[in-house]
Image (cartoon, rainbow, N blue to C red):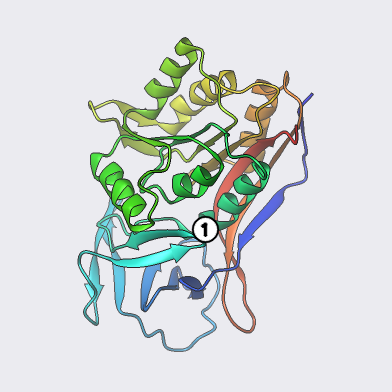
Amino acid sequence: MAGLIEQPVLMAGEGWPDYGLVDSGHGRKLERYGPYKFIRPEPQAMWSPRIGDWDADGEFVSGSDEDGGGRWQFAREVPQDGWPLAWNEVRFTASCTPFRHLGFFPDMDPVWRWMRGQLAGRDDAQTLNLFGYTGVGSLALSAHGPVAHVDASKKSIAQARENAQLAGMAERPIRWLVDDAAKFAAREVRRGRRYDGIILDPPKFGRGPNGETWRIEEGLAPLVSDCRQLLDGDSRFLFLTVYAVRMSSLALGGLLAELFAGLPGKIEHGDLAVREEGEGARLLPTAIFARWSNPG
């Protein structure tokens, strides 16, 4: 039966031709997104930068209140409608969003690679992507079979559909669903559905399409419990990431260990990180995760 491996695991992304972490320090990071470079806040970059002067096309400056906020400041012209990037065979649009992100999460690179490894050799796997954002992960998973992509934001779903068109994957078997992730998972349980793999990336706080309120401290355990009921002994994985909360990866692993005790496989936990480019490169942690995997 699935047991918890207590030793934490590090999943580190090394960058790729269209993305790189150039430098970090003093609470900020300098990243390369195709032909453009941007500076964004990063509280976990507690050290000093390696590079003396950061030359960036734009910088996101955080708001002064506790609720966050902020705005972009540009040193040079950047396309307001975004510009195309690629991860492996998946093409998508990057853009400077009002939420400091650039339309995808580059630290998910090792997660996308790990999930595809769990489904290697399959072209009929049923996977579920909850809080799927702009669809890069769903497009990557669609190489192995049908994907249900769920996000409460109509704008994110629209961007995901555009990314599918850009990637030449519009005909892939992906259901793009504007829905509350927790309610959707609960309905799938009632329908008796099953999946071969589930990825969920819940925010700390959010609202559903009909004004539903999500708080991770209250909603995470019931959601993961529902996800467990959508998996069986032939399923391959569940991957859970959590950002910007006072919680340890060991706590996430303990939750999975309780809920997945009746399944084969193993449960691991640890940190996601991105490695800087160049000499003296350091690892910048970005999120914590827990994962269940079953080699079958």
261 to 91, vertically: above or below = above
Residue depicted at 24% across the width and 81% down the height: 75
Q: How many marks?
A: 1
Observer-nearest residue: 162 or 94?
A: 162
* Residue 121 in view (yes/no): yes
Q: Which residue is mark 1?
A: 107
Please tell me whether mark 1 sits on a helix, a strand or a loop.
helix
The part of the image, by quadrant, that contains residue 276 is bottom right
Q: Amino acid at mark 1?
A: Asp
198 to 120, vertically: above or below = above
Residue reaching furthest bottom?
Answer: 52
Placement of the N terminus among the 4 image quadrants: top right
251 to 260, vertically: above or below = below
Q: Indicate left or right for 261 with 190 as reference.
A: right
Expressed as whole percent of the image width and height from the top left, the position of residue 234 reads 69, 25
Q: Indicate left or right for 167 with 83 as reference.
A: right
Expressed as whole percent of the image width and height from the top left, the position of residue 200 reads 49, 37
135 to 35, vertically: above or below = above
Circle 1 residues within 10 Å: few <14, some 14–19, many ≥20:
many
* Residue 246 in view (yes/no): no
Q: Indicate left or right for 273 with 163 as reference.
A: right
Residue depicted at 31% across the width and 28% down the height: 213
Placement of the C terminus among the 4 image quadrants: top right
Observer-nearest residue: 53 or 126?
A: 126
The part of the image, by quadrant, that contains residue 185 is top left
Expressed as whole percent of the image width and height from the top left, the position of residue 135 reads 40, 47
Expressed as whole percent of the image width and height from the top left, the position of residue 146 reads 48, 35
Residue depicted at 64% across the width and 41% down the height: 119
